[in-house]
């Protein structure tokens, strides 16, 4: 395997400044990609990821923008190309939020925001990136779903609906653009050790671990390596796939 399989390839990572997104940004840069680290509000976090990448000899820039806004989504693709000095090659549509509650208590505002960011945001950035990639007849897109999008989860009807929609979007888009040499795949993480899971009570964590055959939570780097593979030429005959990275939780 090439040590830097993504050498020079401009890659936009939405939600790239924290948690899984930050791990993806760092990993892709370490393997040669020129990474645009998108953030919605926390510029300091994005700058910290960029500083870490550049200190290690990689290339990265921070780009702000709300993926739920179609104009901002299109602008961040243009900005990535301008700032990194080349045409877009890859997109990782990772940005997402949660607003968990029982369905009887989910407000219309919380429903709309989760759908707008997780599903709408994926659509907006995929639409903008696809226009660029279609002209070049090459490139790869990785979207981010969840084990919840595959199997559902108590108290997460809005999140499950949004992530299930991402899977359907991925498969439809893969069929649309495959003839032009563009691959579109989806990663469905299980429970990953991030700020969100760090606050789980011990009893809930124990239940999750008991349901996971590998007996541990995933690490952000587990997802990052999977994303890198799907973007690389090693995955040249893979498109429309949904790859569960969940320690066996979804079996």
Image (cartoon, rainbow, N blue to C red):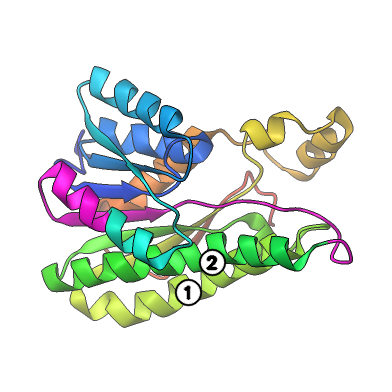
**Extreme residue toward the top, this view:** 55
Q: Does the CB distance between marks 1 and 2 fall below 8 Å?
A: yes
> Which dot marks residue 169?
1
Instruction: Please state which of residues 16 and 72 is positioned toward the viewer in this rendering.
Output: 72
Q: Residue at x 65, y 67 (%)?
A: 112
Report x, y in % for residue 27. 35, 34
> Where does the image place residue 55, in percent across and percent down from the top left?
25, 17
| Quarter residue 163 falls in | bottom right
Q: Measured along the vertical axis of the image, is residue 114 above or below residue 45?
A: below
Element at label 1: helix
Q: Residue at x 78, y 45 (%)?
A: 211
SS at mark 2 in the image? helix
Q: Does the stretch in magenta take in 92? A: yes
**Quarter of the image with the N terminus in it:** top left
Label 1 environment density (alpha carbons within 10 Å; few <14, some 14–19, many ≥20): some
What number is the disc on residue 119?
A: 2
In the rendered structure, does residue 85 fall within the stretch colored magenta?
yes
**Location of the C terminus (image quadrant):** bottom right
- Which span is picked out in magenta? 77-105
Q: CA distance from mark 1 to mark 2?
A: 9 Å
Q: Quadrant of residue 69?
A: bottom left
Q: Is residue 22 visible to the viewer in this orientation of the structure?
A: yes
Ranked by sequence position, the earlier of labels 1 and 2 is: 2
């Amino acid at each position: 395997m090439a040590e830097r399989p993504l050498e020079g390839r401009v890659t936009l990572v939405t939600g790239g400044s924290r948690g899984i997104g930050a791990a993806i940004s760092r990993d892709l840069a370490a393997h040669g990609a020129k990474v645009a680290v998108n953030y919605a509000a926390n510029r300091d976090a994005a700058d910290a990821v960029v500083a870490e990448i550049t200190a290690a000899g990689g290339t990265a820039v921070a780009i702000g923008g709300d993926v739920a806004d179609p104009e901002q989504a299109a602008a961040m693709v243009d900005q990535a190309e301008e700032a990194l000095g080349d045409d877009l090659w890859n997109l990782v549509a990772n940005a997402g939020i949660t607003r968990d509650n029982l369905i009887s208590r989910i407000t219309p505002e919380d429903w709309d925001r989760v759908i707008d960011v997780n599903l709408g945001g994926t659509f907006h950035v995929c639409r903008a990136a696809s226009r660029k990639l279609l002209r070049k007849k090459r490139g790869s897109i990785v979207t981010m779903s969840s084990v919840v999008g595959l199997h559902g989860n108590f108290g997460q009807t809005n999140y499950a609906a949004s992530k299930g929609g991402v899977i359907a979007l991925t498969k439809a888009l893969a069929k649309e653009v495959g003839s032009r040499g563009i691959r579109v795949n989806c990663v469905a993480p299980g429970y990953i050790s991030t700020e969100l899971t760090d606050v789980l009570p011990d009893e809930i964590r124990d239940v999750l671990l008991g349901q996971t055959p590998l007996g541990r939570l995933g690490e952000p780097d587990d997802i990052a390596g999977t994303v890198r593979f799907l973007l690389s030429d090693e995955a040249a005959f893979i498109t429309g796939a949904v790859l569960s990275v969940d320690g066996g939780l979804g079996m």
